[in-house]
Image (cartoon, helix red, strand yellow):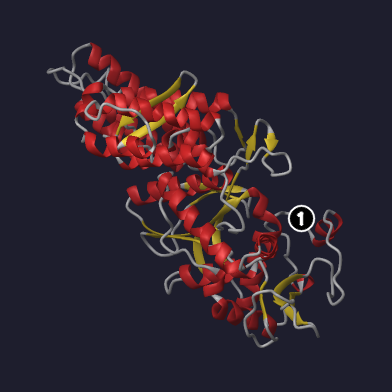
Amino acid sequence: MRLQNTLTGAVEDLVPVTPDRIGLYVCGVTPYDAAHVGHAMSLMVYDVLVRYLRWRGYQVTFVSNYTDVDDKLIERAAQQGRDPLELANANIEQWEREQQSLGLLLPDVRPRVTREIENIIGMIEEIVANGFAYVTPAGDVYFRVRSKADYGKLSHRNIDDLRTGTRFEPGDEKEFALDFALWKAQKPGEPAWDSPWGKGRPGWHIECSAMARRYLYTKEGGDRFDIHGGGVDLIFPHHENEIAQAEAAKHAPGPTFANIWMHNGMVQRDGEKMSKSLGNVVNVAEALDRWSPDAIRMYVLSSKYRQPNNLTDEAMAAAVAGIERLTAALRPGSGTTPPSVDAVDAVATRTRFIEAMEDDLGTPQALAALFDLARAINRGRDAGEGIEAAQATLRELAGVLGLTLVERATDEAAARLDPVPFAKLASRLDVACSGKDVASTIDALVERRLAARTAKDWALADTIRKELDALGVTLEDGPQGTRWGVKR
């Protein structure tokens, strides 16, 4: 597999530092608020990477952190009159539920800053001892940027350019404007931990260097792991500082930290950056209420991961239609003759799929191979040929991309469902139903959800969707309204 490496600017071979194993670190969220769809779509890129590597036989260790103590989090908690750690924990729990609703793989290791303090302090001590950081009289610890001659190598800028192009101003005790905090002395009312420099808390950047080193360095790989991922907005200063810290802690010849740096493009809403000031942020709950996890994933994978994504209603309608096309190809056929090599060439599809994914995670080309296979399956069905083997290939490869491809709603499919829990759900929501006709009960619940959405009661709308999903029914919002389906 070959991946674009931000550090070198080249597409490079992925050569595991430990044979048959891949270590992946992806910067996680700062849980000061509910996660938005940009977080979800970024994580889907690495979710697909993990799924594909495991499908190809690698043992993958996927690490993604939570910054559960931070300036933004402390400020938001103060505004709400809550304890910062309690607020962080509540938002983390919500985000992990939403990840599962989106069909995302939870990372194997999900470290939190507040549980890694000893590890982080140990790394800061190494950096200070090696002369790359200094302690101020107030008890802050700053990284000495000018001590690293190659600082700026990830963002491909030098120190003078970085200083000119930023708004950084020297603090009272900083030696240099670009020096950044490794440890922040406690301010009144802030969470704090004991350290050799007095009570305080970690700076933002040090946490990821310390966590990646702890969970991904191996005996065979030494001071290296395979892939570090995140959004392009993290290249500078966050990821730039991560490299500097890791190398300063080691302070020995030879390469250190991540072999390949992957960066995904950001999500826009109707051509503009999503921001609360513009009022165009789409949170995960709202996205799940409007579109299925499959449709959201189809939207993400239809574009190259390094390019910005423009979230529009038209783009999502196209994603919904794409899912319907793939799902329709999985309808049972009635053919009894062997499949035609010309009509249904599953082997060629598998080859195209692998070639696309190996070429810098080329999901648009991989999807194109699946759509061609779906067309071939439909032609084979129309010709009365056997299509089961080709359908099995379509299901398998779609699964590698994390697509579930549930069947569309039919009365026959609904008839297989137990009517009792649907009747109980309708009763709780004061929705009229016959109690026996599951399809009509689902229709009534879908109408109740539509009314909630019209009233902008997103909580109720999301609850109905989640309750139906738990009962085996999926919802798909498209330009023609809402379709419901029964899970395969």
Nearest to the observer: residue 300 or residue 147: 300
Residue 328 position, x and y percent, is 32, 22
User: Residue shown at 70%/63% (left/top)?
Assistant: 75
Amino acid marked by disc 1: Arg
Q: Is residue 113 left or right of residue 176?
A: left
Residue 33 position, x and y percent, is 60, 54
Nearest to the observer: residue 72 or residue 303: 72
User: Residue shown at 63%/55% (left/top)?
Assistant: 7
Does residue 390 appear anywhere in the picture?
A: no
Say above or below: 132 vs 376: below
Nearest to the observer: residue 196 or residue 231: 196
Q: Is residue 392 left or right of residue 452?
A: left
Q: Picture quarter containing residue 484?
A: top left
Residue 449 position, x and y percent, is 45, 32
User: Residue shown at 57%/43% (left/top)?
Assistant: 283
The single residue placed furthest to the top in the displayed view is 383
The residue beneath circle 1 is: 157
Mark 1 burial class by Cα count in 10 Å: few <14, some 14-19, many 20+: some
Say above or below: 239 vs 98: below
Nearest to the observer: residue 96 or residue 326: 96
Q: Is residue 449 left or right of residue 204?
A: left
> What SS does tag 1 mark?
loop
